[in-house]
Image (cartoon, coloured by chain):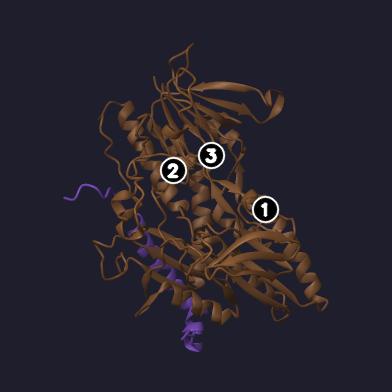
Amino acid sequence: MVRRISKYKKFVMGNPVIQFFKFLWLSLKILIIVAGGHGGTRKVS
Amino acid sequence: MAKVVILGAGISGHVAASHLRRKLGKEHKVVVVSPNGNYQWVPSNIWVGIGRMKPKDLLFPLAPLYKKKGIGFIRGKAVTFHPEGDTENSSPYVNIEYVLGEDKGKREKVTYDYLINATGPRLAFNLTEGLLPATNKAYSVCTYDHAEHAWKGLQELIVSMKKGQKVKILIGTGHAKATCQGAAFEYILNVEQELRRHKVRDMAEITWIANEHKLGDFGMDGMLLTYGSNIMKSNEMVEMIFEDRGIKWILGAGVHKIEDGVAHYENLEGEYKSEDYDFAMLIPAFTGHGFKAYNKDNDDITEKLFKGFMIVDADYTAKPYEQWSVQDWPETYQNPSYANIFAPGIAFAPPHAISKPRVSKNGTAISPSPPRTGMPSGITAKLVADNIIDLIQGKSKELHHKGSMGNMGAACIASAGYGMTSGSGVSITTYPIVPDFKKYPDTHGRKLGKTFGEIGLAGHWLKLALHYAFLYKAKMKPFWWLIPE
């Protein structure tokens, strides 16, 4: 069964105040994941 | 003195050129060869395709920047590769053809000590009969001028909808082996929102058509991700979004022919079907450029350099899906036959797909090719530049900078609608890009937490912030190098 987006979720998704904090959190989280480093896969330490 | 030649000035080529120039002394030459005179921030083409940005907002001319920074620039395209030189000269070179000015059509040998092939993909519209941008009511958003055409077509459609005409819109992939589903996903959500903004949403039936087996595959075999406090599959997340927006979907579809307002496709059941439309945006297949390579005796050695795209340090042994491993994926993007040639970004030949290959009952392969988006393109270009710098400076003969897509995270900030207060974005990160089923056996090869999804206005702001940040970085403004790839 397909999940639905509730009215409350939609409110959260579009509320600029909540989303401002989400923006800060998202920016930080993505920066950590993306800039958190990369490397090879063939030599296992 | 060393000379580094970079073919291509897209995300990958430009990142490599800018890092090489910053870190190498002026005694070393950095030369970019590209048929395009502009740098374009491709991820924002989506917004040109809905008329919310102009091409000038996402591009700038490269020649003045390169002149200022001391980077050589040739407006030409590579034609043939000669990694051993020829009988007259033993220096390796690339035969290039000028595309502009008095020298247009003239060929020249551009010698190099190190070569970075960052030529990206060829947009192979010819592999789908009748698929050409702005022809047969079908459009593309792969380049800014394609996107501009798409906006013109969409604008005309909106006018006719306002007059009371009901229309059908078809967006997705235009070939059985196409990739870049993410761009089509962004476009369909943006178009849907624009129709609501123009108060004509109820006049349109919007359909997603793709070669994916399930929604949310994105050429990455789908993903298991965290969404708030839930754990869900990417197909469930995309189904939820499409359901909310009233978008229908057709999956496992290999589009093979386009006629005026009709897309013909074969599905995984082996059925031949067609879908009518009044406006379509279909991503074409991506292929290599069909370059040829020759040794010093002028013998054809294309198979040493190319396998469609360029051969690098990947394991190209053919094996079934069950035996695929992250170790198959390249780490340094160095050609195994010629150690001074590298191919980061989209220019390297992937060892295999990421999504499980699927074949229709008629034997037609219908499944996505592996995507390589802007972020891994930038990361791989930077590590190639860093390795070349180490080699030139004699720091090491080994390549220490490595970055396999099996040990690299990626963020896909998909726009889902434009607007400072009414916009939306679907932010998805995956770690790693290529699933590592040995390391993460219970979570479909990826690390939960680092693989997550988020929907909302913040995603739109983030995509907009990235637009400005990456253009700032590309223009090499003060401290540009502090912004990560």
Q: Amino acid at mark 3?
A: Ala
Q: Nearer the viewer, residue B372 or B418?
A: B372
Where B356 sits versus B161, above or below?
above
- In the image, B375: left or right of B278? left
Whole-percent x and y of residue B444? 32, 68
Q: Which residue is mark 2?
A: B348
Other residues around mark 3 within 10 Å, as few (<14) / some (14–19) / many (≥20): many
**Residue toward you, B387 or B293:** B293
Foreground: disc 1 or disc 3: 1
Query: Can you say whether B204 is above or below B94 in the image?
Result: below
Residue indicated by mark 3: B9
CA gap, disc 2 to disc 1?
Answer: 25 Å
Tell me, by letter, which chain the rendering colours purple: A
Q: CA distance from mark 3 to mark 2?
A: 16 Å
Q: Residues within 10 Å of mark 2 (few under 14, many from 20)?
A: many
Chain displayed in brown:
B
